[in-house]
Image (tube, helix red, strand yellow):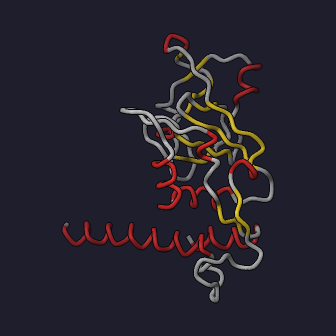
Amino acid sequence: IENLHIAQQQLKTYRQSVLKWAFEGKLTNENVKEGELPEGWKMSNLNELKQFSLYGPRFSSKDYSQDGIAVLRTTDISERGKVDWLNSPKLDLSEKDYQKYKLLKNDLLITRTGSIGRLSIFNDNKKAIPGAFLIHYRLSEGLNIWYIFHFLKSQKAQKHFSEHSFGVGRPNLNVPNIELLQIPLPPEKEQNEIVEAI
């Protein structure tokens, strides 16, 4: 058991090292110099990469029902983006409201209240909307969403979320502070290679 715990810690350390190398360009570019981006890379942010961002709508607990459209929390979505449909709250929502807030495959969800920096990608085909504690991002075409996901899970990004949250007891994160985070962005082909390596 002790050896297993040690191995788990070593895996976490190794994963963070792999993420660091990935976003410095060292996984796909052997000769990249320290502090420089590889050729073809650029710095960007979610403001430049998004189609839109939207705060999840707030509903009263009395609005929830046994059936209807799922209202998701990041805890309802696995690392692979699959939804726990059994435990997510449901809402009898009008078609107009559903169309306004609906989630599509590859939409990014970031927790903005409480568990700051927890995130997931919606990777399902059923009807769902984000809950009130989430920020919903739909990103532009030509991006590997899992590259963005892994970057936002890196120590650098998580540190940024922590430092730019505000409030006592239940910290909060907002869109302007999220979009201050600079994202090293390679060409799409290289994004795909990095995601495969990770």
Quadrant in the picture for residue 95: top right
Q: Is residue 87 left or right of residue 103?
A: left
Residue 162 at x, y = what percent? Answer: 46, 48
Please state the horizontal and vertical placement of residue 129, each as a whole percent of the image. Answer: 64, 30
- Rendered residue at 36%/32% (across/down): 169
Question: Residue at position x 60%, y 77% from top?
Answer: 35
The picture quadrant where one finds residue 181 is bottom right
Asked whether 134 or 193 is in front, the reply is 134
Residue at the outermost left position:
2
Residue 98, image x, y percentages: 71, 24
Identify which residue is drawn at 65% across, 60% down. 183
Q: Exactly how many numbered labels are in the figure?
A: 0
| Residue at image point 74% right, 52% down | 49
Q: Is residue 135 above or below residue 35?
A: above
Q: Farthest residue in the top direction? A: 62
Side of 173 relative to 98 (left or right)? left
Q: Quadrant of the N terminus?
A: bottom left
Q: Is residue 57 above or below residue 151?
A: above
Name the one closer to the observer, 180 or 155.
Answer: 180
Outermost bottom residue: 31
Q: Quadrant of the C terminus?
A: bottom right
69 vs 126: above or below? above
Report the front residue among 86 and 130: 130
Residue 149 lies, in percent from the top left, at 59, 56
Query: Is 150 left or right of 40, judged from the image as shown?
Result: left
